[in-house]
Structure formats: structure tokens, C-alpha cells
Amino acid sequence: MRDTAFKRTLKTLLLGSTVKIEGPFGNSTLHNNAAKTAVLLAGGIGITPFRSMVVRAAREKLPHRIFLFFSNRRPEDAPFLEELRAAEKDNPNYKLIATMTEMEKSKRPWHGETGLVNAGMLSKYLKDAQSPVYYIAGPPAMVKAMRDILSKQSVDDDDIRTEEFSGY
């Protein structure tokens, strides 16, 4: 856990203290036009809004084609990984592409992608993607890197939605 002001404040609260919580906030909801492919680019805990999208799409049997690129250091660091893998069985329109960047530090086996999500990895899986809408959530540096890749591919800003998760 990172040493953020929020967590330091929580640590000093006495047991039984009253707190006021607002949220969650954000606009990470799946677009309505099912003819457009959803491309979800998540880093670490940035998976949180996308997990909800994937679960809803499976539960409601939405026709959207969904590609989820999920980058983590190691499999043991990847929140919801098994649930996201299992969702592929429930939704034939959904594809998980998980990648690990520090497998040399892992104690678990990994047979998926390795390295950072990059233009080559995107093009490998998105050959047939129809008018994609890109959603990016994760650490600020990851969000910027993904935006830069999409900008170099001339993706219209109207087709990119971002959310940064900093300080968690």
C-alpha cells in the first residue's frame, strides 16, 4: 500500500469514528453503440471500472465486442485476474489479454503475454476491431503512454476515455 495522505488520516482515526464517503465518481461506462468494439486498457487497480463493464456485459448478454488488455507486474499482483479469465467462458464477445511486466520476480507460472502493452500488442489482437472506443484506466504514466500510442495511430480523441488512478 502506498503512503498517501488519505491512508495516513485513516490510520489515525479511532475505532468507531464516523466518516463521510462520497462516490464513486467517473464516467467509465460502456458505450451504447454495440457496432463499435470496446478496447479496455487497464494497469493494476485501474481494472476496477472495467471489471464492472465486463461483468455487466456478460450478465446482460450485451452484443458488444470487448477486448481487455490488463497489465500488471506479476500474476499475484493482478486484482480479479481469475474472475476476468472465467468471464471469457460466459461471454463469447469478450477477450482478455493479460500481460505481466516483471515475471522474473514472480513465484507463479505464466503462459500469457509479457511486457508492457504497446502498439504491436494492440495490433496483434485488434485486427478486426470495428470502430473501436478506447477506455484507459491506471497509473498516470500508463494512461499517458496509452494515449501517446493511440495518438500516433490517429485515433480520434472522441474515441478515447481515460481515468487515472494515482496514489493508491
Image: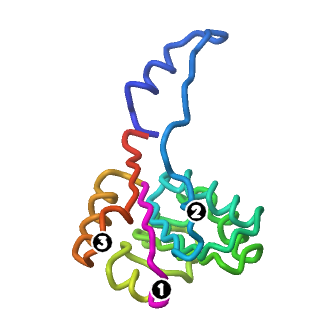
For marks 1 and 3, the one nearer the N-term is: 1
The residue where tag 1 is placed is 125
The residue where tag 3 is placed is 150
User: What is the crowding at mark 3: few (fewer than 14 residues within 10 Å), some, or many (at least 20)?
Assistant: some
Q: CA distance from mark 1 to mark 3?
A: 15 Å
Numbered circle sitting on residue 106: none
User: What is the crowding at mark 1: few (fewer than 14 residues within 10 Å), some, or many (at least 20)?
Assistant: few
Q: Nearer the viewer, mark 2 or mark 1?
A: 2
**Image quarter of residue 73:** bottom left
Q: Is residue 39 magenta?
A: no
Residue 51 position within the rendered picture, expressed as x and y whole percent measured from the top left: 61, 57
- SS for tag 3? helix
Mark 3 and mark 1 in contact (Cβ < 8 Å)?
no
Label 1 is placed on what type of residue?
A: Tyr
Q: Nearer the viewer, residue 120 or 58?
A: 58
| Numbered range of the magenta stretch | 126-137
Residue 117 position within the rendered picture, expressed as x and y whole percent measured from the top left: 38, 73
Label 3 is placed on what type of residue?
A: Leu
**Image quarter of residue 54:** bottom right
User: What is the crowding at mark 2: few (fewer than 14 residues within 10 Å), some, or many (at least 20)?
Assistant: few
- Residue depicted at x 48% and y 82%: 130
Q: How is the image coloured?
A: rainbow
The residue where tag 2 is placed is 32
Decide if residue 30 is on the left or right side of residue 162: right
Label 2 is placed on what type of residue?
A: Asn
Q: Is residue 48 above or below residue 90?
A: above
- Residue depicted at x 51% and y 52%: 28
Residue 48 position within the rendered picture, expressed as x and y whole percent measured from the top left: 56, 51
Q: Nearer the viewer, mark 2 or mark 3?
A: 2
- Residue depicted at x 63% and y 58%: 80
